[in-house]
Amino acid sequence: MTTPSAVRHLSRPASFPSIFCRGSNRLSSTYAPTMRPLTLDLLNPTVAKVEYAVRGELAIKAEEYREKLKEGNHGLPFDKVISSNIGNPQQKGLEQLPITFTRQVAALMEWPALAELAPNAFPKDVIARAKELSQEIGSIGAYSHSQGVPFIRKSVAKFIENRDGYPSNPGHIFLTGGASAGVSLLISMLIQSPKSGILIPIPQYPLYTATLAQHDGAALPYHLDESSGWSTSVESIEAAIQKAKEEGVESKALVIINPGNPTGALLDEATQVKLIELCEKHSLVLLADEVYQDNLHQRKSHPFTSFKKVVAQTQSPVALVSFHSISKGVSGECGRRGGYFECTNFSDEILAQIYKMVSVGLCPPVSGQIGVDSMVRPPKPGDESYELWKKETDTIHEALASRTKTMAARLNALPGVSCVDSPGALYLYPQILLSEKARDAARQAGKEPDAFYALALLDETGICVVPGSGFGQKEGEWHYRLTCLCPGVDEYVGKLENFHKSFVQKYGV
Ligand SMILES: Cc1ncc(COP(=O)(O)O)c(C=O)c1O
């Protein structure tokens, strides 16, 4: 009979320098020289291939500056770091306040006794909502259903039905710890070998390439067209599929980010129909990342239409996964980790496999699920919370729209800068012309030219952006992404303008 390893360990000689023995000296252990330290070559090789620029070199340096600024004599040419690198609306120093209704419901779910201890602090509809959720969920400290609380999934299905005018099945909805968790799961399930590929827009949000690298799948880039407002063309996707085929790579899925990150572009319905037909033609799963569906700055001229609606309208058989999140929109609850994905045209067999995979992780964060409920079931006219909710959400939409417009106009006025005035999402993605002199200086510094520009911007102004090389761009073109979340546009953009002008003076355009 073999001895279980735990028992074998306990039965080692008394001289064995166990870490459980007080006073043991592990360095002098006779066993230590044989022990192999954990080194990089012992990790899964795919880990080394993962890159995520949003929290890359620039963000790390910005954090160092932030620490340095706490010292009295920091010697830096700025007195604050401006985090324009990440779409994290409630980040310290940014403007977006949490929605009161969302936080009140969350507070009562955390500590239900508050409703009795401070009855006047909460509107009646908030108390009623928390009671209703408590009856369904119980304690938020307990695991929920692995797919997410059934009651909340029903609320999500109703939200989708109201948005699109077509039925939605709560059984086909999976609540997640942010959209990232859902994207990652779907990619991990679709990649069968390094010869499985997923079509990714360029520029893209680096979650996609990072997750593909982790699962050893192929990222198949297709380019968005900057000259027509970062539009998506079927032809460029067809070309990417063809190229992949020639390289022996099978295209398995198409990622569409709508509204786009980093571009902010919005698709029109006619293009959506063409993209669905393309997926039908090539049997592609359509991964529709719609986390910015409520960040619309030109609602009338550029409305959002979900892929779910167009698939239902055209009665397409395409397998569609639609992702949404509480991190963006007016909610901006990035740290709460809540989101969902809805599967359309998926067989019960596949849904069962997805369910099995999500159950390995037990359940999505329950506080995030409650955040999803507040996002999909905001107060209605007539509810006590409604007026405040309306005022808060209108303020967020208006501030973002006006900042985006002002920033795009001022960036466009700079020499060598062109910027699409994005109708959606939280970002601008200006193109910058960088002279040969600037490119030479970048080469000497061992940096990509746009990273060189972004590092200089950070060093001189404390403004942290993400170079375009982190999102992908055409050979010989340079961009950077900045968020439109920072308050004090005048001061902030003023610093950007001054920096750019002095950069141009030094290196030319
Ligand atoms: C396009 C896109 N998809 C997904 C995510 C991830 O969002 P979440 O916080 O819900 O994981 C982001 C975050 O910035 C994003 O920009």
Image: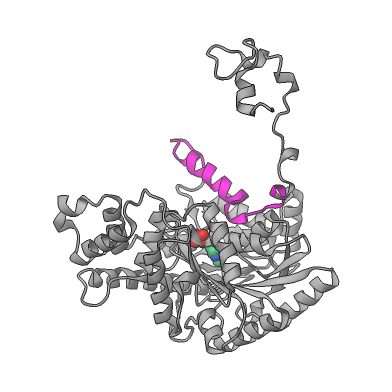
- Point out the image quarter for the N terminus: top right
Instruction: Tell me where the magenta segment starts and ends, as one range.
Output: 47-76
Quadrant of the snapshot with the C terminus: bottom right
Left-right relation of 286 to 243: left
Among all residues in the image, which is located at the extreme front?
1
Q: Is residue 316 magenta?
A: no
Q: Is residue 57 magenta?
A: yes
Q: Visible in this render: residue 482?
A: no
126 in relation to 394, above or below: above
Magenta highlight: main SS = helix
Instruction: Please state which of residues 297 and 70 is positioned toward the viewer in this rendering.
Output: 297
Of 229 and 452, the residue lying toward us: 229
Residue 335 in percent (x, y) is at 44, 54
Mark count:
0
Residue sitting at x 60%, y 68%: 350
What scheme was used to colour the molecule? Answer: one colour
Q: Residue at the location (76% across, 56% down)?
A: 440
Q: Does any portion of residue 441 appear in the rendered image?
A: yes
Above or below, 268 against 28 in this view is below
Residue 161 vertical placement versus 104 (above, below):
below
Residue 162, by quadrant, is bottom left
Find residue 439 and report its horizontal and vertical position in percent.
74, 59
Above/below status of 235 relative to 368: below
Q: Residue at x 39, y 76 (%)?
A: 158
Residue 390 image position (x, y, % from top left): 29, 73
